[in-house]
Amino acid sequence: MKGVAAATVLQPDRHAALVHRNANRQVVIWTPDREPRWRTRRASDAINLLAQEVKAENVFFSVNQFFGRRQVRHLASLNALYVDVDSHQEEVNLSALMDDRLAEIARSGVPEPSLIVFSGRGLHFYWIINPTPAAALPRWQACQRQLQRLLQGDPAAVDCTRLLRAIGSVNARAPETCRTVTGILLSTASYDFDWLAAEILPRSRAEVRDIRAMRARKNGSRRSAASSGRRSIFDWWMAVYKDLYLIIEYHWPKGVAEGHRDRMVFLLAVALSWFTTGDALDAEVVSVARRVAPTLSEAEVLSYTSSVRGRAVRASDGERDVWRGTPRDPRYHFKRATLYDWLADLIPPALEQNLTAIMSKMEHDRRRSEREGARDRVAEGRHRSSHAPQETRTRARLLSLEGHSPRTIASMLAVPRSTVADWLRSANTS
């Protein structure tokens, strides 16, 4: 917490007000030990309700906001990134745990969290962001995974529907000495999500190229990772999820026909498994199936998706499979070609033009050719990095002497990190 004036936060409503800066959408409050167990209210009303929960046992609220039900498809606003770090020791030393994780954050170069909550047997680290539309969910999810791995947090607590303990409430399961949930506020300011995500996620050469192109264009328009032909796993499954709905709406606006139901429900469940886990995933899958295949019973839905849900449980437990000698997430990883083969009979040319993930190889190659043809490689800086002016190289060396990392220097100078590393290496050997 070096250089930051920390303040203690003791009230549930103060906690919620820090996170929920947009008062227009729904927040869910959960009190599992008493009725009503679930309350869904506009953010402003939820904050007022939480003011009455001081010293109450086991009070939770949703970090993000929703259009009614607390489900991925009803997500309205993303309000924070968060990591749940559990202490697995009988003697809980949360201060030492906090110092260790803050040191890890400092070493990584990730910006400091806004708020740290002492939850009783662990810590919740929050990076509060300006209210961000649900369309940013894939990138938000990628940030969640990156932070969870960095802080060795709970892999099951990274979904957007997560409920976290309210400051000022009581964790009845925690040791007597730390049952009251408290918090340390490091900053009242909120982060811009795009800026924060750029600081958290590793940058690829394609992303650096896009930064150069953006700076070169006077109108300031930006290209996303998807538009440059590169997607994160979360971008991919969100695109698949949307394509599946387009296919369903094209053929069966009143419900998927028998003979196709198990296939469509299974694939929708696979997509959802990348954004939510555990019991929440079960509820999401049943809810989606009720909407797109209302003639299926809940038992049939759970049967069709049992392998999907089993893999999601393994992922939330931190397990990994080995694929071609490399550990990877146990959830399903279907390629574009595989999905197209499964669904080709449902994708006429008129529909394929509107899909962004599930398409034939011919259509995929055609779109890639169009993208490549539209690129301005001079604006991207593709022909400049290896012949950079001497002053740029000198600037990189000076920044290195000032203590900046190659990654930071690359961002500041809009050149690939590998190029900066080459410059610094040659300077050290000359």
Image (tube, rainbow, N blue to C red):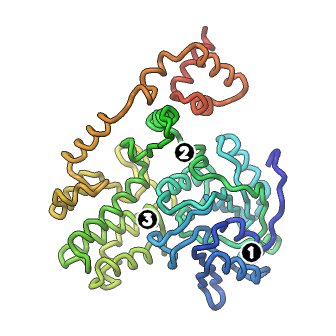
**What amino acid type should be assigned to the residue bearing mark 1?**
Asp
Q: In x, y percent, where is residue 198? A: 56, 44
Residue shown at 35%/63% (left/top)?
241
- The residue singled out by tag 3 in the image is 312
Residue 225 falls left or right of residue 2: left
Q: Say which element carries label 2.
A: loop
Q: Say which element carries label 3.
A: helix
- For the view shown, which residue lies furthest in the bottom direction? 35
Give the CA distance from mark 1 to mark 3: 33 Å
Badge 3 vs badge 2, beta-carbon distance below 8 Å: no
Q: Which badge, 1 or 3, comes first in the chain's sequence?
A: 1
Choose mark 3 or mark 2, whichever is in front.
Answer: 2
Which quadrant of the view contains residue 243? bottom left
Residue shown at 74%/73% (left/top)?
174
Residue 186 falls left or right of residue 161: right
Q: Which badge, 3 or 2, comes first in the chain's sequence?
A: 2
Residue shown at 37%/76% (left/top)?
288
- The residue singled out by tag 1 in the image is 13
Q: Residues within 10 Å of mark 1 (few under 14, many from 20)?
A: many
In the picture shown, does residue 68 fall above or below 415? below
- The residue singled out by tag 2 in the image is 201
Give the CA distance from mark 1 to mark 2: 32 Å
Give the CA distance from mark 3 to mark 2: 23 Å
**What amino acid type should be assigned to the residue bearing mark 3?**
Ala
Choose mark 1 or mark 3, whichever is in front.
Answer: 1
Residue 362 appears in the figure: yes
Q: Which badge, 1 or 2, comes first in the chain's sequence?
A: 1
**What amino acid type should be assigned to the residue bearing mark 2?**
Leu
Badge 1 vs badge 3, beta-carbon distance below 8 Å: no
Which quadrant of the view contains residue 128? bottom right
